[in-house]
Image (cartoon, rainbow, N blue to C red):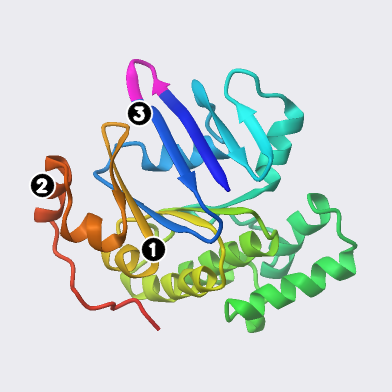
Amino acid sequence: MIEINHLSKKFGTNLVLDQIDLTVKEGDVVGIIGPSGTGKSTLLRCINFLEQPDTGSIHISGTVVEAEKKNRKNLLEIRQKTAMVFQQFNLFKRKTALQNIMEGLIYVKKLPKEEAERLAKEYLKKVGLEDRMYHYPKQLSGGQQQRVAIARALAMKPELLLFDEPTSALDPELVKEVLDTIKIAASEGNTMLIVSHEMNFIKNVANRVIFLDGGKIVEDGSPSEVFQNPKSQRAKEFFSNLYYSEEPEYFL
């Protein structure tokens, strides 16, 4: 169970998150959508304290971090329970795909090298890259790099997976392979928060959608409720300006 209570964040005088309250159940796949600049990525980064929230608390499976009372110990605990997949992959350039996955397993999970290597190979196979394990990031396409990043996150077996626009840096023809990888991970019961502009994908992979505007959650419901019957005027305007197919084009 993940609970976010009264989470707020300002950048200067700009209030980006305004008293966010959110509860996520184990196994939920929550799509986070909304206009650009409404705090979607900031929300993810505040959950694992890559950004320092001004107020509020994060509860993840018994670990509680309060923004104004954090300490090194509970920050480490909360980060060990989350894993984030970034827009720009964030792989170590001088390490192979295999080494990129092993790094966290050895230095964070404290696994023996042999066990870390076994798990890294297992997760590379899971994302269809067992034949690229000894390749360096520059030898991989953007889609392959992002799949390595997803494998790295999954291998840590976090309580919560955070995806921050995982396809925004990819050429259009590479998007599907990454979305298919995320879909498989979702079907295996992983708890996820996914920020994405891929509306068809969110509609078909998430069991819950929240719509952020002005730093607040203005819609929260099933994909059909939020996409087909939004209650707020802002969400209605947002969807009226989009085109998205009724077909689940990103399904395998």
Residue type, numbered disc 3: Val
Residue 72 rendering spot, x and y as whole percentages = 74, 28
Location of residue 104 with respect to 211 vertically, above or below = below
**Label 1, on which residue?**
206
Question: Is residue 49 visible from the viewing direction of this image?
Answer: no
How crowded pointer 1 is (Cα within 10 Å; few <14, some 14-19, many 20+) is rated as many
Magenta: predominant secondary structure element? Answer: strand
Residue segment shown in magenta:
10-15
Residue 237 - label:
2
Q: Residue at x 11, y 41 (%)?
A: 233
> Which label lies toward us, 3 or 1?
1
Q: Residue at x 56, y 72 (%)?
A: 188
Question: Is residue 40 visible from the viewing direction of this image?
Answer: yes
Distance in Å between CA atoms under marks 1 and 2: 22 Å
Secondary structure state at the residue bearing disc 3:
strand
> Which label lies toward us, 1 or 2?
1
Q: Residue at x 44, y 40 (%)?
A: 22
CB contact under 8 Å: marks 1 and 2: no
CB contact under 8 Å: marks 3 and 2: no
Residue type, numbered disc 1: Ala
In this rendering, would 224 be left or right of 232? Answer: right
Residue pushed farthest top? 13
First in sequence: mark 1 vs mark 2: 1
Residue type, numbered disc 2: Glu
Secondary structure state at the residue bearing disc 2:
helix
**Label 3, on which residue?**
16
How crowded pointer 2 is (Cα within 10 Å; few <14, some 14-19, many 20+) is rated as few
Residue 198 - label:
none
**Nearer the observer, 83 or 167:** 83
Q: Residue at x 72, y 37 (%)?
A: 76
Residue 47 lies in the magenta-colored region: no
Secondary structure state at the residue bearing disc 1:
loop
